[in-house]
Image (cartoon, rainbow, N blue to C red):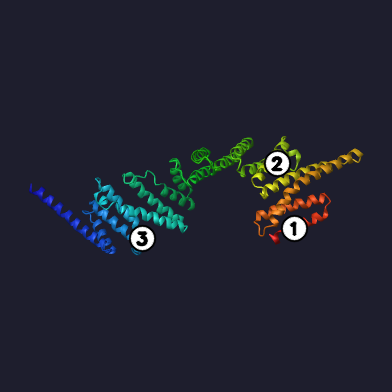
Amino acid sequence: MKKILLASMIAVVGFSASAQNLDKVKTLLKSNKFEEAKTEIDKIAETEKFAKNPDVWYNKAKVYAAIADNEAEAAKVPGARATAFEALKKYVDMDTKQHISMQLDQFQPLMSIYQGFFKTGAASFNAKDYEKSYGDFLLAGEVSDLMQKKGWSNVPLDTTVILYTAVSAQNAKKEPEAAKYYTILANAKVNGDGMEDCYKWLADYYMRNEKIDSATKYLSLGREIFPKDSWWTSMELDMLREKGEKPALFAKYEQAIQESPDKLEFPYNYALELYEYAYNADPAKRPANSEELIGKVETNLTKALTLQPDHHQALLVLGQVKYNKGVDIQNQAAALKGTKPEDVKKRGELKAEAIKKYDESIPYLEKIVEKFDKEGKLKMEERQSLKNALDILIIVYDQKGMKDKMKVYEEKYNNVDKVH
C-alpha cells in the first residue's frame, strides 16, 4: 500500500516539474524572449519523462510558430514553421480528448501556422520561385486537412490552397503533381471565375499523354459546369484532328458554327482545314468532291469576314482561293496546244475566264494592302501576309497587262521590311 502511494506521489511531483518548466517557457515567450524560450522547450521535449506530456508539444508548437512569425528570429531558425507543425501534430495525436489548450488559445498556433505557410507560398509564387511555393502550399494544405479531419473547419474543401498548389506544381514543371491537385478540384466540380482552367488543363494534359478517356471525362465535366465556354468545342476539334477523322472533324465544325455563330475561329479554321484537304496544285491529287468542298471554303471565309471584315488572314486565304481558281483555268488553256481556230478560240475563252477569277481575288488582297499601309511596324506574321498579298497582286496585274499597276505593287513589296 505504501509503495502505491509513493509511486503516485512521484508521478505528481514529475508532472509538477513539467508544469513549472512550461510556465517558464510561457513567461519567456510572453516577454518575446524567443531564443531562451526555444532553448527551454527543446530541453523539456528532449527529456523522456516530460516528452509524454501533450502540453509540452503544444508549447513547442507555440514557441516555434512565434519564431516563424518574427522575421528576424525566423532567419536564425530555418524551418521553424515546419517544426511548429510537426510539434502540433504530436500534440493532437497525444491529446485524444478535447485539445483544451488549443481551444483556450482559440486554435492558435494552428491558424498562425496555416496563414504563415500560405503567406510564404504566395510570396514565393509572386517571386516565380515555384518549387518553394509548391512546398509551402503543400504544407498549408496539410494544416487545412488536419483542421477538416478534426472538425475544426466548416469549409469542406480548401479550394484556394489546392488551386495554388496545382498552379505552383504546373509552373514548376511537376505535371503529375499538378494533375493530382487539379483532379481534386475537378472531381469536386468546383466553379467560379477562373476555375474552368482546371478542367481545361486536365483535358489537355491527358490528351497530350494519350489518355483519351480521361481527357474526354474532364472535357465533359468542364462543359457541364461552364457550358458557355467555346474552348470545349475547340478541344473536341483538336481530338478529332489528332485521330485524323476528317468526316467527323468537318461535322463537328458544322455543329460548332451553328451553335456559336458569333465565333470567328470556327468558320475561319474550318475553311483552312477544308482547303488543306480539298486543294492540291495537281488537280489529279484532289478528292472527287474537291469543287464542292472549296465552295464551302469560300462560304466559311465569307462568314468569318462578316464577323471581322479586316481579318487579314481570312482576306488572304479567300484571295488565294480565287487566284488559284484562275491558275487552274490558265493551266487548262496552256494545255491546249492545237493551232486550229477552235483551239485558239478555246484558249482565248479560258484565258478570259482566268482573268475574271484573278479579278475576283483583287478586292480581298488590296484590302490587306490598304489595312497595313496605314500602320507602321508590323508583326512578323503580318508582314508575311502583306508580302503574300503583294506577290499575288503583282502576278495578277502582270497577267492583266497592267504594267504600271504591277510596278506600284512591286515597289511596295520591295519596301515592306523597310516600312514595316
**Mark 3 or mark 1, whichever is nearer to me:** 1
Q: Are marks 2 and 3 in contact (CB under 8 Å)?
A: no
Q: Secondary structure at mark 1?
A: helix
- Residue 211 location in percent, x, y? 52, 40
**Kind of residue sitting beneath label 3:** Pro
Horizontal side of 278 relative to 46 (left or right) equals right
Disc number at residue 240? none
Q: Could you tell me which residue is drawn at 83 percent across and 41 percent down?
A: 350
Q: Secondary structure at mark 2?
A: helix
Horizontal side of 345 relative to 19 (left or right) equals right
- Residue 261 location in percent, x, y? 61, 40
- Number of marks present in the image shown: 3
Horizontal side of 420 relative to 163 (left or right) equals right
- Residue 66 location in percent, x, y? 31, 59
**Kind of residue sitting beneath label 1:** Lys
Q: Could you tell me which residue is drawn at 78 percent across and 44 percent down?
A: 357
Picture quarter with the C terminus: bottom right
State the image quarter where residue 35 is shown.
bottom left
**Kind of residue sitting beneath label 2:** Glu
Q: Could you tell me which residue is drawn at 28 percent across and 61 percent down?
A: 38
Residue in the foreground of this view, choosing between 69 and 211: 69
Q: Secondary structure at mark 3?
A: loop
Where does label 2 land, which residue?
A: 298
Question: Which sits earlier in the primary sequence, circle 3 or circle 1?
Answer: 3
Question: Which sits earlier in the primary sequence, circle 1 or circle 2?
Answer: 2
Where does label 1 land, which residue?
A: 412
Residue in the foreground of this view, choosing between 71 and 93: 71
Q: Residue furthest left?
A: 2
Where does label 3 land, which residue?
A: 78
